[in-house]
């Protein structure tokens, strides 16, 4: 079974993003970019399945600008076998990405796709579920444990009240939550080796996908600031303030 | 113009932000219908019918809807979508799971986790973990929207809409729920609690974390946690407040031994009153707190519990 792992290039999770003065977006010039953290977890899970004999090949896929090749090289350095970049300078929204991924999944005859549950830039949490719908595959989102059996996967999911275990028929889509695993670091020898692994570049047109955006961003603004609070000296003063000033107890 | 709100429920009541999604849908400019799909969910449909602003409740009954399986729920919603301008649900684990399937099958974009409705096609939503807010306009004919519960008041239970039974769709039989392990608690549900006591790494152990119980009981509060506390195994994962956990906005949020990583702040900074108790005066949590108290939480928490 081939496993496809889509990875997204996003602003590094340690960067404090700034809204542009003209409110057209956030500042991306000279900002450190990295693989979306949830996608690192997806790569790790795919590699573990391959090491456990459940998969034959792990293919990393990205969609976006040429620089996404760096993100794919990271996936290759972690251990993915090869990579595919769907290269475009166009703004890509989740529905368009899901359509591109559908075309790649079908071309590669993948039996499982593991994605991060959301990207930490647009926080959409859509692509995996959309891909599942377009392929008419079942999905197991927000996974914290994955077991691959005969023709089905058993997945423990993080839900609002606790945990839920679902069984999905294969082929299927899995999206990762934080506690699924701890992604490995790429070692220097593996980073060197990754440079020689195959990385194919295709264009959206070649996949027959229209990637035109459906949502127009009219404005990006800073969140409302909280006004500065006060420090209290002891518990007595705290209780007094909560009772008589804030009136919340 | 009519919006269809798909309500999360537990067979007796609507839950998980469904009442807040109804409020958001009411602001989109047309009538509001609610869909309740489940097995033995008649009481939940009756509960949905009480929500203010709802014109009609559709009730679909069937074993295929019992676990909220996204493949079956999405197929049902798509079969109903023809009559609607907006498809709306809460941005809970339930809503996030099925709604993108609906959007993809209708070939429309989804607008995730809105916190504001500007007009019938324009919405406000957080991006970058709430460090920025985008105003986005949907150019699609049908708007698929998930609603962040803390952005909207819950619709009051003052209405009395008719409930109409509708035919159930086929069981796609692609997945099934094997088991659920829900955290048992007599306390209020974290996502909708009016008061929350939340603990972090400063509590130093699972045993110490239990000292929050007495304080929460005294306040009638739900208990939350930072990711650090959850990852250290002090408490179950569904306690986590933050960008990747629950987004909360209670009247009172008491952060105990929580340093205030961006990730955590994204989940609680819309709380009305924030109290921070931490031994480190430089902790970032104090920058968002209304009342800060620097000191040893192992002395402060018992004293606070006793003085309340």
Image (cartoon, helix red, strand yellow):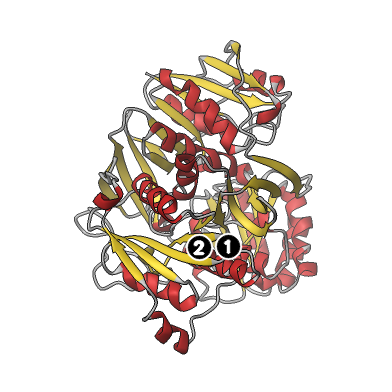
Depth check, front residue: B94 or A84: A84
- Give the numbered dot on residue A38: 2
Which quadrant, please, contains the C terminus of chain B? bottom right
- Give the numbered dot on residue A178: 1
Q: Is residue A192 left or right of residue A168?
A: left
Q: Is residue A147 left or right of residue A95?
A: right
- Answer few, some or many: residues within 10 Å of disc 1's Cα (few below 14, many 20 plus, some between 14 and 19): some
Q: Is residue B278 above or below residue B158?
A: below
* Quadrant of res B199: bottom right
Q: Earlier in the sequence, mark 1 or mark 2?
A: 2
Q: Residue at x 52, y 43 (%)?
A: B96
Q: CA distance from mark 1 to mark 2?
A: 7 Å
* Quadrant of res A50: bottom right
Mark 1 and mark 2 in contact? Answer it, CB < 8 Å.
Answer: yes
Q: Position of residue A109 (x, y in %)?
A: 47, 53
Number of dots carrying numbers? 2
Question: Mark 2 — on which chain does it sit?
Answer: A
* Residue, far left: A22
Q: Is residue B275 above or below residue B21?
A: below
Question: Mark 1 — on which chain does it sit?
Answer: A
Label 1 residue SS: helix
Q: Residue at x 41, y 34 (%)?
A: B144
Q: Is residue B291 left or right of residue A218?
A: right
* Quadrant of res B294: bottom right
Q: Position of residue B275 (x, y in %)?
A: 58, 59
- Answer few, some or many: residues within 10 Å of disc 2's Cα (few below 14, many 20 plus, some between 14 and 19): many
Q: Is residue A51 left or right of residue A193?
A: right
Does residue A80 appear in this view?
yes
Q: Residue at x 47, y 34 (%)?
A: B102
Label 2 residue SS: helix
Depth check, front residue: B54 or A28: A28
Does residue A161 appear in this view?
no
């Amino acid at each position: 079974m081939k496993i496809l792992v889509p990875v997204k290039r996003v602003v590094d999770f340690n960067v404090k993003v700034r809204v542009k003065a003209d409110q057209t977006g956030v500042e991306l010039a000279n900002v450190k970019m990295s693989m979306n953290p949830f996608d690192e977890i997806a790569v790790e899970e795919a590699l573990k399945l391959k090491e456990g004999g459940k998969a034959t090949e792990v293919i990393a896929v990205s969609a976006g600008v040429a620089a996404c090749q760096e993100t794919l090289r990271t996936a290759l350095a972690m251990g993915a076998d090869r990579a595919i970049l769907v290269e475009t300078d166009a703004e890509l929204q989740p529905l368009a990405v899901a359509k591109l991924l559908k075309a790649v999944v079908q071309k590669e005859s993948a039996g499982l796709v593991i994605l991060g549950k959301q990207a930490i830039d647009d926080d959409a949490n859509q692509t995996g579920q959309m891909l599942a719908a377009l392929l008419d595959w079942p999905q197991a989102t927000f996974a914290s444990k994955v077991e691959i059996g005969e023709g089905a996967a058993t997945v423990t999911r993080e839900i609002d009240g606790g945990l839920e275990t679902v069984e999905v028929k294969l082929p299927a889509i899995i999206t990762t939550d934080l506690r699924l695993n701890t992604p490995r670091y790429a070692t220097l020898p593996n980073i060197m080796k990754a440079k020689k692994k195959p990385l194919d570049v295709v264009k959206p047109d070649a996949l027959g996908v229209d990637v035109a955006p459906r949502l127009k961003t009219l404005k990006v603004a800073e969140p409302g600031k909280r006004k500065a609070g006060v420090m209290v000296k002891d518990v007595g003063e705290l209780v007094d303030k909560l009772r008589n000033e804030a009136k919340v107890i | 113009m009519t919006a269809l709100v798909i309500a999360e429920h537990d067979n007796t009541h609507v839950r998980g932000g469904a009442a807040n999604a109804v409020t958001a849908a009411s602001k989109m400019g047309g009538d509001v219908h609610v869909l309740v799909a489940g097995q033995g969910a008649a009481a939940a449909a009756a509960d949905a019918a009480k929500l203010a602003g709802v014109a009609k409740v559709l009730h679909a009954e069937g074993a295929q809807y019992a676990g909220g399986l996204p493949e079956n729920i999405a197929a049902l919603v798509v079969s109903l979508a023809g009559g609607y301008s907006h498809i709306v649900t809460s941005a809970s684990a339930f809503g996030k799971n099925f709604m993108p399937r609906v959007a993809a099958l209708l070939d429309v974009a989804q607008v995730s986790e809105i916190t504001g409705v500007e007009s019938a096609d324009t919405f406000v939503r957080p991006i970058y973990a709430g460090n920025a807010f985008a105003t986005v306009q949907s150019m699609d004919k049908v708007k698929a929207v998930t609603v962040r519960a803390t952005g909207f008041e819950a619709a009051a239970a003052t209405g009395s809409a008719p409930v109409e039974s509708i035919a159930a769709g086929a069981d796609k039989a692609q997945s099934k729920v094997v088991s659920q392990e829900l955290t048992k608690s007599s306390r209020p549900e974290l996502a909708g609690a009016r008061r929350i006591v939340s603990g972090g790494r400063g509590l130093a152990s699972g045993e110490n974390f239990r000292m929050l119980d007495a304080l929460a009981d005294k306040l009638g509060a739900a208990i939350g946690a930072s990711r650090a506390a959850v990852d250290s195994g002090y408490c179950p994962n569904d306690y986590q407040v933050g960008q990747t956990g629950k987004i909360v906005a209670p009247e009172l949020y008491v952060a105990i031994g929580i340093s205030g990583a961006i990730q955590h702040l994204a989940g609680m900074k819309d709380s009305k009153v924030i109290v921070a108790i931490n031994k480190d005066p430089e902790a970032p949590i104090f920058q968002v707190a209304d009342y800060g108290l620097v000191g040893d939480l192992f002395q402060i928490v018992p004293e606070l519990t006793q003085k309340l």
